[in-house]
Image (cartoon, rainbow, N blue to C red):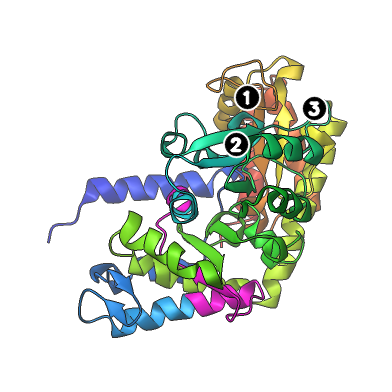
Amino acid sequence: MKRDNVAFRLLQEEQTRQKNSLNLVASENYVSGQVLLALGSVFTNKYSEGYPRNRYYGGNEVVDKVENLARERALKLFKLNPAHWHVNVQPYSGSPANAEVYSALVPLGEKIMGLELTMGGHLSHGHKVSITSKAWKVAQYAVDKKTHRLDYETILRLARREKPKLIIAGYTAYPRVINFKKFNEIAQSVGAFVMVDMSHFAGLVAGRVYPSPFPYADVVTTTTHKTLRGPRGAMIFAKKELARKIDRAVFPGFQGGPHNHQTLAIAVALHEALQPSFVSYAKRVKNNAVVLALELKKRGWEIITGGTDSHVLLVNVSANGVGGYQAETMLEEANIVVNKNTIPYDERPPSDPSGIRLGTPAVTTRGMRVREMKLIADLIDRALKGESAKSVRRNVLELVKKFPIP
């Protein structure tokens, strides 16, 4: 068969872009060669609707072993007793996983409760443009207007007034530790399920640098990329008594055949996360984020909540006269990749918000540490204060050359 030179040229372009960029997108990371090998394996050829030992197609003996391996490793990584917890590794991605949980536990038209998107929540937590707000009623809570942190008393009052069937904790742009015990108490007071979406900080939980939500949750969802450093996929952990409902919501409720190459890659990534080196990695991710926030603050940039307890930080660039879209563009011209992001109570539109979101998982995977975070803060500061993109880019290329993508 003739080689598709056009497609492969695009592949090479993307490899070059990643190689030469300083990736500070909080939801991105670099997978290992073994994960890439699994994703490109012959398991992509196999169809396997159903679950192990209960498939609608023949020839799934090995696929069953792969799925069981991923489930066993997932429970082991988060120190969960199989007698009490179940995990489904088939969800295609994070948003479908969240919708599958709502479908399993909350009747259509009943109410879910999550953090507003502009405050750091996620589209799938009930935002108005998401299907989740059309299939279910939604109550949305906010962060405190002054501290930009979660106010659990206010959330409790809202829950008592709205009486949701399920309350969501875990966010995409909230830099501080979440008090899962408080959410459990709030949910119990109104008879709601607690669902934690730990997509962003799952790797930090696995690395024991962020509190585990499992003692206080009924269901925990997570993507398998981001801080967990696996392929793009998702998992749903549920208390054993909810397992059948969750499994039926995933298949046949929302999905057909699972992506078996993805499941194998998840199993590989979980094996990597079970190694002692992953704990060291998680510690560096968090420490790098803390240092990056501190160094930017020293240079006059406003950090939302004053810092971070995790891998992510929000910077209010508008306080220095720069819009979020403009900042994203200026930085990308210098080969620094971030994403524009709303800040709490943002008066600017989401298309050009007041902030940018930064994260340290990818640069930490490349081997960067505290010294490099200080350099990165300086590069961001120079780019956003008007130094030529060419000048800053030259220094970025010098830095990334020393830390190749593994």
Pick whichever, 389 or 225, lies toward us: 225
Image spot of residue 333 (x, y percent): 55, 29
The residues tagged by marks 1 and 3 sit, at their Cα atoms, a distance apart of 12 Å
215 sits to left or right of 129: right
Q: Is residue 88 magenta?
A: yes
Pick whichever, 55 or 388, lies toward us: 55
Q: Residue at x 30, y 85 (%)?
A: 61
Image spot of residue 147 (x, y percent): 83, 31
202 sits to left or right of 138: right
Mark 2 = which residue?
A: 338
- Numbered circle sitting on residue 301: 3
Q: Residue at x 62, y 16 (%)?
A: 348
Q: Residue furthest left?
A: 1
The residues tagged by marks 2 and 3 sit, at their Cα atoms, a distance apart of 16 Å
Mark 1 = which residue?
A: 327
Give the vertical position of 54 relative to 223 (above or below).
below
Task: Write down the region rendered in magenta.
Answer: 71-96
> Which amino acid, mark 2?
Val
> Which amino acid, mark 1?
Ala
Q: Is residue 314 magenta?
A: no
Q: Quadrant of the C terminus?
A: bottom right
> Which amino acid, mark 3?
Trp
Q: Image quadrant of residue 57?
A: bottom left
Give the vertical position of 142 relative to 172 (above or below).
above
